[in-house]
Each structure stands twice: as C-alpha cells, then as structure tokens.
Amino acid sequence: MSHESIYVQTNESDRNRVIAFRRAADGNLEGMESHETGGAGDGVPHLTSQGSVVLAGDRLLVTNAGSGDVGVFEVGSDEVRLVETVPSGGEAPKSVAERDGLVYVLNTSPPSLGAFRLSEGRLEPLPEAGHELDANSDPAQVGFTPDGSTLVITARGTDSIALFPIGEGGDLGEPVVQASSGPTPYGFAFTGDGTLLVTEAFRAEKGKAAASSYRVDGGSATPVSRSVGNGRSEICWAVVTNDGRYAFTTNFADGAVSRYSVGPDGSIALEDPVAGTAVEGETGLRDEALSADGSFLYAIDADAGRIFGWAVVDGGRLEPVGSWEGIPPTVAGLAAS
C-alpha cells in the first residue's frame, strides 16, 4: 500500500479490520484491501470518538474498543502488515495520539489513559505514565498540542477540556480543566500556532451544532470564539487545513460538511454551513481526514456505507471527487497520508 492512502477500521465485534485504499493523483480511491487488527471492535455503529485510527510515520495505530488493545501496522511499504496487538492499559479504547514516539491511548470504560513509547516500530508500555480520568468525564478524543508539551482531552460528560502537562518520560502532571464554551465538546483539531478548535454537539439538539476556538499557551486554554453555530445538527468531527486558515467539521445528523475560517488571533467564523455534502439530510457522516498534502478531504458516511471525497481548492472550497462503497455500518476512524 503506497504512502498516498487512507485507512479506516471496521469496528466489528467478531474481528476488527483495517480497510485501506490507495489514493490516486486526482483524489480517487482504489485497490481496497482488508487486514485484521488482531482484536475486536465493539460492534456498535457510530463509535463515539475522534482519532481511533492514527498514522505515526510508517506505523498505523488502531484502537480495538471491544478487546481492549491496540493494533500496530507497518504501512511504509507497498503492504499493510500487522506488527503486533498490545493491551491498551484499560477497557474500551477509542482514541489514540502519537508525537515523537510518545503514545497515549484513551480508554473509556472506565476513563483512563494508557501510555506507551513507540520504539523500533513497536509499542512499549509506560505503566508509570498512565493516568486515571474523572469517572464522569465521558471522553471523546485525546491529542497533543502542536509543541508537544501538553495532552488535551475533550470530556462530554463534564462539558470540559482537560490539559495535562507532559513531563520527562511521558509522566503527566495535574490537569488544567477549562469549561467548554458550549455543551458536549467532542472532536478537536489544532492549527500550527496553537489555536484549538473544538466541536460542540449540543447533545443532539436539532439545529444547534457549533464550534469554539481557544488559544492554548503554557498548558491552559483561553476561549476566543464561543459557540459559533452552523445551523446544522450533531457536529462532532474537526480537521484544520495545513495553512491553518480553514476548519472543516462534519455534521452527523444531516450529511453536511461545514467550513469555518480561522483568523490570526484564533477567532473563527462560519463561512459555509454546507461546503460539501454526503447524502443531504441523512444521518451517518462522521470521521474525516485531510490528505497529508492538504489537497483532499475524506469523510466516512457509516449509514450509507461509503467514503466521500472532495478536492480542497482556492478559498477552502470543496469540489466532489467521488464516493466509494464497501465499508460496514460499524466503520469508524479515518487516517490519510
């Protein structure tokens, strides 16, 4: 499998699999392949997280929510090869993040963090660096700040964003907890200069989906733009373009991709509530990812059993390049190279 590829997980309860597609120069996907992760998904449609499938150099990390482990694949050649499957340090892992070989896995039942070092292509547990989380937090995503000094977790149950300072050896300090600007903080993404954009599902209140932005500095988050609505429903996933000027969010309940602009001061503004569509007005649109070069956006539509793709052109506009079937309704996570 070439470097220009996308990867999703099936999240099936009997055996979890990675489905890989090659990406052509025009954005079309081809050559679908399936590879077992060595574990099991939870078998529930619409896995509640962002970041369940993540690229880390020539390794692909995949959380197995049903069996409590992480599959590690080699993807740096023309093949996708399972290297190992490692216990996640907890139960129901649903999100994973990696930076400079340091890996944290977000376990959700009960909430906790498993810590690892990615060394020579394998995960080495760091038991002392793990961390218990608030039992009421209902976390959705784990990720690093751009400078790698802080670990961020969105928590829907407590409507908060937790920021953990990362110490030597991966040890986590006591978190700074920032109240979310709006209810149900879910997926998030960073610009390169430290603006944090967080989606807010508003607990599925119809027409009240929103996103907020924060400036993250010194391990704390300061709100900039609070709950900028897009008039859609169940906004949950977010990505930011390579130049940091635009954010795309997917709306699960109505099939729309919205586009926000990001200002130099970290403020955001809604530019187009329907910059792209999967199946207009239908549920199912969820995890999304930009290709490494920023030229293409892909998103899963679990209910339609398809992956949709758009070219990102001048001004952040989205032009459809196609859709591809062959994924099950339990599909989750999306990573692109």
Image: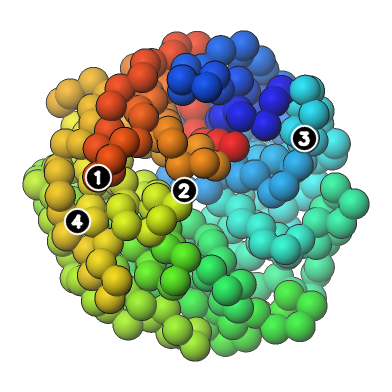
| Number of numbered tags placed on the structure image | 4
Identify the mark nearer the N-term, 3 or 4.
Answer: 3
Residue shown at 76% from the left, 83% from the top = 168
Identify the mark nearer the N-term, 4 or 2.
Answer: 2
Labels 3, 4: front one: 3
State whether residue 30 appears in this view: yes
Give how far across and how far down residue 106 sits, in percent.
Answer: 59, 58
Residue shown at 45% from the left, 12% from the top = 325
Amino acid at pointer 1: Gly
- Residue annotated with mark 3: 76
Tell me if residue 63 comes above or below residue 125 in the rendering. Answer: above
Identify the mark nearer the N-term, 3 or 2.
Answer: 2
* Image quadrant in which you'd find residue 98: bottom right
Cα separation, mark 4 vs mark 2, equals 16 Å
- Residue annotated with mark 4: 210
Give how far across and how far down residue 210 sits, in percent.
Answer: 19, 56
Cα separation, mark 1 vs mark 2, equals 26 Å
Labels 3, 2: front one: 3
- Residue annotated with mark 1: 315
Cα separation, mark 4 vs mark 1, equals 21 Å
Specify whether 229 is left or right of 58: left
Labels 1, 3: front one: 1
Which quadrant holds the C terminus? Answer: top right
- Residue annotated with mark 2: 50
Labels 4, 1: front one: 1
Secondary element type, mark 2:
loop
